[in-house]
Amino acid sequence: MEKANPKEGALFAKEFVKTVLVIVGTLIIIKLFILEPFLVQGSSMEPNFQNNNYILVESLSYAFGGPKRGDVVVFEHPENTCDTYVQKHPIKNFLDRLYFIGSVPPANPCVDFIKRVVGLPGETVIIKNGTVTIKNNEHPDGFVLNESYIPDSANFKLQGDMTRTLGKDEYFTLGDNRQPNASLDSREWGALPKSHIVGKAWLRLVPTNEAGLIPEPKY
């Protein structure tokens, strides 16, 4: 009977560990920098995104350019509470975002949001009488945004009157649900910095009868 060669066993174990580490490392890179799962919670993006829709968020394209008007983006809340938390708990925040182990106390305030981009850097966004008007270099007198993703049957107009001029790398976002108090968005907390954007809603997985690429609106 042949005896097991301890060197061969050690070599196999070493190669196995290396393979596992490569696989895990690749999954982490994909998760953090290319595709990230996201569970829609709440009704702020109805009727286009429902509570418990499961989507994939693509982040690679934003490494080479910013969001376009109409993009549905997932982002970290831009308020200072999240910045302070990350400074105090950088490792825990990193682990929480992996979704592998789940969040553990203390509670993480860096909850991701999902909204639609309507205003781009350098533009002026005017909300008045339920409509969104955009002023930019191409349209200095402004144009009313034709929001085709809002159904004609909607009984509620966009709430709030305001004017906001966006700075460099700032975006104005709104929820698709136009019922009163249905969406916490740029009307409340102001412009969204690009540095807080995780990525673009790219693919819907659940519910399966609506699975597929998320459409891009044409203005």
Image: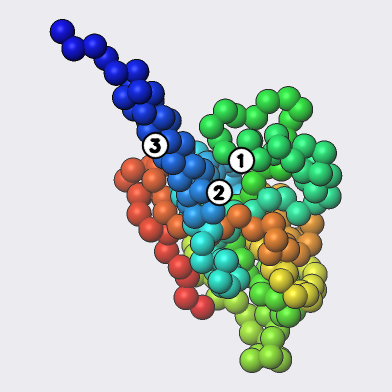
Q: Which residue matches tag 3? A: 19
Q: Is residue 74 visible?
A: yes
Pointers 1 and 3 in contact (CB under 8 A)?
no
Mark sitting earlier along the chain (2/3): 3
Q: Which mark is residue 32?
A: 2
> Which marked residue is nearer to the observer: mark 1 or mark 3?
3
Q: Is residue 101 above or below residue 191?
A: above
Q: Residue at 55% of width from left, 76% of height from top?
A: 146
Q: Give how far across and how far down residue 185 sits, in percent.
A: 71, 56
Secondary structure of residue under mark 1 = helix
Residue 172: in sight, yes or no? no
Of the two numbered discs 2 and 3 in the rendering, the one whose residue sits closer to the viewer: 3
Q: Residue at x 54, y 54 (%)?
A: 33
Check if mark 2's residue and mark 3's residue have beta carbons within 8 Å: no
What whole-number distance in Å separates the C-alpha atoms at marks 2 and 3? 20 Å
- The residue that label 1 is drawn on is 97
Q: Position of residue 188 (x, y in %)?
A: 78, 56
Q: How dense is the environment of label 1, judged by Cα within 10 Å: few (below 14), some, or many (20 and up)?
A: some
Quick one: SS at disc 3? Answer: helix
Earlier-in-chain disc, 1 versus 3: 3
- Between the C-alphas of marks 1 and 2, the distance is 8 Å
Vertical arrangement, residue 187 with respect to residue 51, above or below: below
Q: Are marks 1 and 2 in contact (CB under 8 Å)?
A: yes
